[in-house]
Image: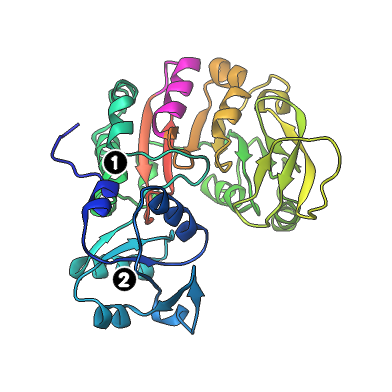
Amino acid sequence: MNDNIICLWDRLKETKKPIILYGMGDGAQKIMTVLDSLGIKISGFMASDDFVRGHSFAGFEVKRLSDIEREFKDFIILVCFGTSIPQVMDRIKTIAKSHELYAPDVPVIGGGLFDLSYARENKDKLEAVYNRLADEQSRRVFRGWVLYRITGDISYITKNQTEKEELNSFFSLSDDEIYVDLGAYTGDTSEQFIRDVNGKYRHIYALEPDGRNYGKMLKRLENADNFTPVNAGVYYKDCIMQFVQRGGRNSTLIPYEKGHPTDKKIRDIEMKSVDSLLFGGECTYIKMDVEGSEAHAIKGAEHTISVYKPKLNIALYHRTEDIFDLPLKILALNNDYKLYLRQHPYIPAWDMNLYCI
């Protein structure tokens, strides 16, 4: 690792500039927690003009950028939210041209920071994955991703992002697919799959644990043929767990305890492994976007992956260790895979996917 790289957290510890957080909500709270643990003070919050409207957050009045510019001569901006909206991404890039701006990398799920010391500690694993990437674009994405996570500099990721249509150059689907959609949400990804194969496929299995999302999926795909919806989460074994139902893409599992919690958003949910779902049979394509449970999903698909070698599309950005842990788990099960890495337009480095063929 280049010794000239400056870790974002070290930069923030040594700066004399005011630190302004851009955005509110869970992302801001996570970043504030890290800053507080490092003894780094913040000076305020800002939001896009349409979102200010007298809001306050963490005891600070939320201001417009123009207000912050009048208050402070020079300052650092930390982006505390994720977006794939082109206009919002363009605004962030425009602000970065005039101000020192970073998008700190904090895990979506779990703990730990991908800082310089973490990269050095896991150098061998990172190099093992890098050396197995199948094309130069994957290697560019990987290098940029590592540098971004250490520095918070968004230019390392934005310059390597590609549109999903680019996948057609190496990730092709046939009219004979058996598709397993893990984290099917409201059915949008299964619906996209049906479009991609022009409605011709053998079967779709779609797992979604959140009850409201599951209901929306049933309605959206009510006319789909050869379609098996399953109101369950994916795990390394079949069991019952407790599930925090939030109705969006951020529903999560919590450890199972006997008894019934009083929080109405928490309920028992059936969990299935891929191998159990398929009764040991074949599938040709698995998509995994399961909010940090990807490692469990891979373990529960050991037979399927090792015997049938289905195409894999795996979200690689939820946990700090996913960048090396998930690819190495896949290769341990089937060393014949070719690995491709792509990030589709997003700030920060979300929608980062591992494609295995």
Q: Is residue 324 magenta?
A: yes
Cβ–Cβ below 8 Å for labels 2 and 1? no
In the rendered view, would you say 128 is above or below 113?
above
Q: Quadrant of the C terminus?
A: top left
Q: Is residue 183 left or right of residue 18?
A: right
- Foreground residue among 265 and 229: 265
- The stretch in magenta equals 323-337
- The residue sitting at 36% across, 80% down in the picture is 64
- Please rate how many residues cluster around mark 1, counting C-alpha atoms within 10 Å: few if below 14, some from 14 to 19, many from 20: many
- Image coordinates of residue 228 in percent, x first then y, are 74, 40
Mark seen at residue 141: 1
Q: Is residue 204 visible?
A: yes
Q: Secondary structure at mark 1?
A: helix
What amino acid is found at the position of numbered circle 2 in the picture? Arg
Q: Is residue 238 magenta?
A: no
- Please rate how many residues cluster around mark 2, counting C-alpha atoms within 10 Å: few if below 14, some from 14 to 19, many from 20: few
The numbered mark, 2 or 1, whose residue comes first in the sequence reads 2
Residue on which the image places disc 2: 91
Main SS of the magenta part reads: helix
Q: Is residue 357 visible?
A: no
- Image coordinates of residue 274 in percent, x first then y, are 66, 28
Dividing the picture into quadrants, the one containing residue 257 is: top right
- Foreground residue among 196 and 267: 267
- Image coordinates of residue 96 in percent, x first then y, are 23, 65
What amino acid is found at the position of numbered circle 1 in the picture? Val
